[in-house]
Image (tube, rainbow, N blue to C red):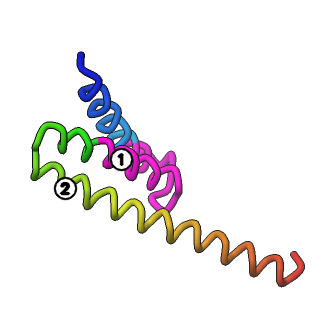
Amino acid sequence: MDLIHVVGGIGTIMVLAAYFLVSAGRIASASTAFQGLNLVGAALLAYYAVVLAAWASVALNGIWSLIGLVAMVRIVQMRRSKAAKKASAGV
């Protein structure tokens, strides 16, 4: 098996695992675990699709990666904001 197919397989497993874990109630959709699995999985799938010149899949997974990145940044910002509020409140 070529390395590129391993990359595609790992990306697929990550995206499906994220969906399964949220659907099973194991992780929250607003968690870094969910967004991280989606972000990295979709990025791997986008790379896989680029190598195979599967342009519709590149678009889908590229956009999926960007959505995951934006969500991850928001989660991190929200956590930092909450931590700063706690620190300023003396808690």
Magenta stretch mostly in which secondary structure?
Answer: helix
Residue 49 falls in which quadrant of the image? top left
Q: Foreground residue, 6 or 37?
A: 6
Callout 2 environment at 10 Å: few (<14), some (14 to 19), or many (20+)? some
Front label number (2 vs 1): 2
Q: Residue furthest right?
A: 90
Residue 10 falls in which quadrant of the image? top left
Q: Label 1, on which residue?
A: 19
Q: Residue at x 17, y 57 (%)?
A: 59
Cα distance in 3D space between marks 2 and 1? 16 Å
Q: Position of residue 51 (x, y in %)?
A: 18, 38
Amino acid at dot 2: Leu
Q: Residue at x 69, y 75 (%)?
A: 82
Bounds of the magenta segment: 18-44
Q: Position of residue 30 (x, y in %)?
A: 49, 62
> Does the segment drawn in magenta span residue 42?
yes
Secondary structure beneath dot 1 equals: helix
Q: Label 2, on which residue?
A: 60
- Mark before the other along the chain sequence, 2 or 1: 1
Q: Quadrant of the N terminus?
A: top left
